[in-house]
Amino acid sequence: MANTASIEIDGKKHEFPLVEGTENEVAIDITKLRSATNGVITIDPGFKNTGSCESGITFLDGEKGILRYRGYTIEELAEKADFLEVAYLLIFGELPTKEQNDKFHEDIKAQAVVDEDVKKILDAFPKSAHPMGVISSLTSALTAFNPSSVNVDSEEDMYRSVVKILGKFPVLVAWTFRKKEGLPLDYGDNSLGYVENILKMMFKKPNSEYKQNEILVNALDKLLILHADHEQNCSTSTVRIVGSSHAGLFASLSAGISALWGPLHGGANQAVLEMLEAIKLDGGDTKKYMAKAKDKEDPFRLMGFGHRVYKNFDPRARIIKKAADEVLGDLGVVDPILDIAKGLEKEALEDAYFVDRKLYPNVDFYSGIIYRAMGIPTDMFTVMFALGRLPGWISQWREMRLRKEPIGRPRQVYIGATERKFVPIEER
Ligand code: CMC
């Protein structure tokens, strides 16, 4: 294959180098385009054809349904690793040894305390506040209690900021949930595993012991692993671009959480359940909603179907579908919402509109079903997604800073008014 690409503008040919990744993805390096062509830029709304960076963290092939973190398949990681090992792998590049893993966990536990004054901030939110708004604000508030910038040239400083946020974030998640539920705030139990502790911190009632359920621990562990990274999606790109201004880690993460909130991204898991509830209330007629989804005059979309990158199947959905069946079977859950979900899934998989457009159930179609069975309220689903995505955001931010990437500052093609004279208000 040639190692350059040429672009002809006004009869003048310009050559640009091709960059090839380790998985043979090819990109045209246009870093010199503007200077070489006297101001010509590219335009690509939604960045469907634009690589924003070179990254060694996550590889995905949407056509083949491949997802790998640092070279390991998601299937193998979900089966054999736990969430903290995956977090370490994503952030530091290698699976931890037993010693590294133990130290990592100990260091995280040592940071799993939040300044008591954060409770005052939490108190100021109404109970009706959306948990995503609360968690993004609390994460942002952490910057006030911790130095906002990290010395990226110091491995030690970097490590400290990583364990700090991995320690404190689950506490904030649990508090966000407990405040909504009217439960007293809890600091959890450092003798437990990372995921066990999250469940206990969330669900422990003040008047009774909390009993761990291994099936739920396992399902949450898997869900967090499946969500841990997904290369340059909307929230990750946000974290990288905010961090590229050298804003602190917590500030960058808080921006990422806000980006995740939207229903076309992480908010889809909440949207899926709300859609299923709405269908149930409307009599459970899945065919009616299939027709709405296909009607171009109707803005309704089947939430939990389709993906910007996966165009054959979402490998995470396959893994989590199995876990969902296990959880529901083991808990003996009987829920009309699940029948509606199964009905929609079956119809969509056989429908020409969905098949032709390669629209398959994505990870969020199933994750909400598991969270619901676990007793997590719908508006907390995206917060759980953020909990899983945390190591991914951290690793992407760390990589961006270590590679000394320049500040993210896209260009535009201006389509507004050309220069015109100011008209005084009385003459308008
Ligand atoms: N229901 C009905 N039609 C759909 C859907 C859907 N869920 N998704 C896409 N389409 C149609 C769309 O109308 C278009 O049709 P046409 O070619 O006739 O105009 C075609 O499929 C291509 O859609 P697109 O919007 O160009 O695809 P995209 O890659 O820009 O969007 C998406 C991807 C995920 C935003 C979209 O599929 C969607 O809105 N899905 C529902 C929301 C959802 O489940 N999001 C979670 C994504 S997974 C979690 C994450 O990683 O963040």
Image: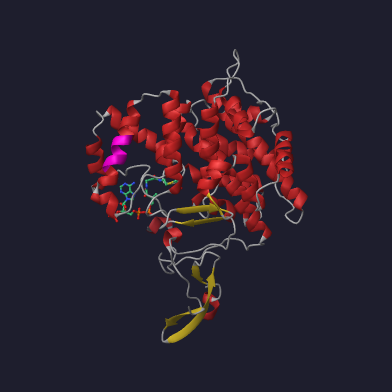
Tell me the chief SS of the magenta region: helix
In this rendering, would 243 be left or right of 428? right
* Nearer the observer, 74 or 248: 74
In this rendering, would 115 be left or right of 74? right
Query: Could you tell me which residue is drawn at 36 percent across and 42 percent down?
Result: 303
* Nearer the observer, 187 or 359: 359
Q: Is residue 342 above or below residue 402?
A: above
Q: Residue 400's spot in the image, x, y percent?
A: 63, 58
User: Is 277 a magenta residue?
Assistant: no
Q: Quadrant of residue 80?
A: top right
Q: Quadrant of residue 300?
A: top left
Res. 415 visible in picture: yes
* Nearer the observer, 217 or 57: 217
Query: Could you tell me which residue is drawn at 55 percent across and 28 percent down?
Result: 214
Q: Is residue 418 above or below residue 338?
A: below
Res. 268 visible in picture: no
Quarter holding the C terminus? bottom left
* Magenta residues, start to end: 342-347
In this rendering, would 428 be left or right of 383? left
In this rendering, would 249 be left or right of 68? right
What scheme was used to colour the molecule? secondary structure
Query: Could you tell me which residue is drawn at 70 percent across and 27 percent down?
Result: 191
Residue furthest top in the image = 207
Q: Residue 201's spot in the image, x, y percent?
A: 61, 26
Query: Could you tell me which residue is drawn at 66 percent across and 55 percent down?
Result: 246
Q: Is residue 371 above or below residue 64?
A: above
Q: Residue 370's spot in the image, x, y percent?
A: 45, 32
Q: Residue 334's spot in the image, x, y percent?
A: 36, 24
How many dots with numbers?
0
